[in-house]
Amino acid sequence: MTEPLLSTRVNATVAKIRSRLGGLTPTVGLVLGSGLGAFADGLENAAILPYGELPGFPVSRVVGHAGRLVVGALGPGGNGPICAAMQGRVHYYEGHDLAAVTFPIRVLVALGCRTLIVTNAAGGVNRALHPGQLVLLSDHLNLFGASPLRGDNDERLGPRFPDMTHAYAPELRVLARRVALRLGIDLAEGVYAGLSGPAYETPAEVRMLATLGADTCGMSTVPEVIVASHMGARVLGISCVTNMAAGITGEKLSHDEVTETATRVRGEFVALLAGILGELAAEDR
């Protein structure tokens, strides 16, 4: 039996989600990385949909990733933008292929989220950075060894050869810098290198990444941004540097350090996200 077109599967999941939203139409998608999932708990009048109830959504088994889609309005009284927030994501290293990893992103965009904010926990490659620093993504290096667009292209979703010149929307980066300045948040900017994991990079690999121009590195984000760009959404990416990459400090790396640092700076990260979403709402008015 022939497998349904990707767009057909996406639309079926969108229909399932819409049946649970009571008329809400999200315009902003949020991918909440390690330590940030609680941001979605502040959405007003929210519909909460566990990934296991959504056709095609893979379920993460990584600690700190709740595995729920939360759709609701931001701000006092729910007057802010309607957001569809992913509390956690799945990763390529868990054994999923990149098409499965990025399927939820396709659903968010098809649901109406033409703006996507992607966050992650990252290792610091640039020695000028420090643990706890927030970094605005200006570009990325796809070092997964594959693309989520590999295989037959479904023209209903996007072109065969999408342009990636502005994968991270310049106007959204300007907006984020303006919010950070107003809030007094130290927001750096740089290039993110996405790798397959799950092993952390070796010191030699980190030196290679620095030579290639990477400022941060991690095991997510790049496939999601490629797919969002393929579908014509504009993307804002923000990393939280949770540790310096291997070989820089001489210390061993651990997932506990990642979650501890992400938790420590959560308040600042949440304030930045809320400020950015407030600016987006003001632009739409």
Image (cartoon, rainbow, N blue to C red):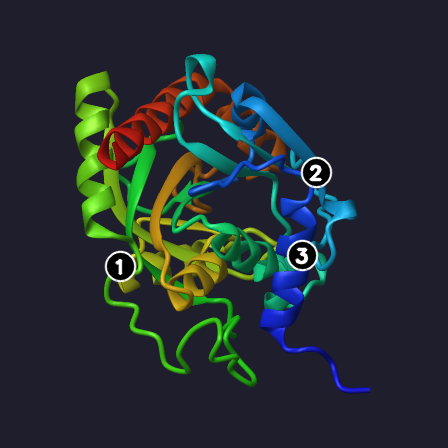
Q: Position of residue 144 (x, y in %)?
A: 51, 67
Q: Quadrant of the N terminus?
A: bottom right
The single residue placed furthest to the top in the displayed view is 76
Cα distance between the residues tagged 1 and 2 = 39 Å
Q: CA distance from mark 3 to mark 2?
A: 12 Å
Residue at the (48%, 71%) spot, across then down: 157
13 or 57, nearer to the observer: 13
Q: Nearer the viewer, residue 90 or 63?
A: 90
Q: Which residue is mark 2?
A: 49
Quarter of the image for residue 4 reads: bottom right
Residue 36 visible in the shown view: yes
**Residues packed near mark 2 inside 10 Å, few (<14), some (14 to 19) or many (20 plus):** some
Let me know if residue 252 appears in the view: no
x 25%, y 31%: residue: 285
State the residue at coordinates (53%, 23%).
43
Secondary element at image label 1:
loop
Q: Is residue 135 left or right of residue 223?
A: left
Q: Which residue is mark 3?
A: 13
Location of residue 165 with respect to 206 vertically, above or below: below
Tell me which amino acid carries mark 2.
Answer: Leu
Circle 3: residue type: Thr
Q: How far across and how far down the image is residue 128, in percent?
A: 24, 37
Q: Which residue is mark 1?
A: 213
The local crowd at label 1, few if under 14, some if 14 to 19, many if 20 or more residues have their Cα within 10 Å, is some
